[in-house]
Image (spheres, grey):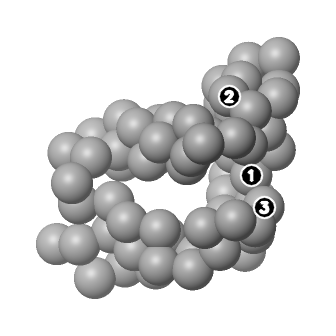
Amino acid sequence: MRKINVKVVPNARENRIVDEKDLLKVYLKAPPKKGEANKLLIRLLADYYNISKDRVRISSGLTSRRKTIEISD
């Protein structure tokens, strides 16, 4: 299992992922309401790592912009 630190920027102009030294900065078009941004985050990370969505899980920071993501093997 791999852990990734993520900083989320909701309500962005476009969906994109920027790989910074110690974390991924993920820009999301979705607003942080009703879990929309979290769902989009999981989908984007699954596409980024070319894995299925069920292997990506938010382990901490569900309601925060700073999150820890677990990717299962």
Dot 1 and dot 3 residues touching (CB under 8 Å): yes
Residue at horizontal 81%, vertical 44%? 9
Q: Looking at the image, is mark 1 or mark 3 earlier in the sequence?
A: 1
Residue at mark 3: 65
**Left or right, residue 20 beside residue 69:** right
10 Å neighbourhood of mark 2: few (<14), some, or many (≥20)?
many
C-alpha gap between disc 2 and disc 3:
13 Å
Residue at mark 2: 30
Instruction: Pinpoint residue 48: horizontal percent, then vertical percent.
Output: 43, 40
The secondary element bearing badge 3 is classed as loop
Can you see residue 18? no
10 Å neighbourhood of mark 3: few (<14), some, or many (≥20)?
some
Q: In the rendered image of this protein, does residue 45 appear above or below residue 71?
A: above
Residue at mark 1: 8
Instruction: Pinpoint residue 39: horizontal percent, then vertical percent.
Output: 47, 42
Q: Looking at the image, is mark 1 or mark 2 earlier in the sequence?
A: 1
**Badge 2 amino acid:** Ala
Instruction: Pinpoint residue 12: horizontal percent, then vertical percent.
Output: 83, 26
Q: In the rendered image of this protein, does residue 31 appear above or below residue 45?
A: above
Q: Looking at the image, is mark 2 or mark 3 earlier in the sequence?
A: 2
**Badge 3 amino acid:** Arg
C-alpha gap between disc 1 and disc 3:
5 Å
Q: Which image quadrant for residue 60?
A: bottom right
The secondary element bearing badge 2 is classed as loop
Residue at horizontal 60%, vertical 67%? 62
Q: In the rendered image of this protein, does residue 17 appear above or below residue 63?
A: above
The secondary element bearing badge 1 is classed as strand
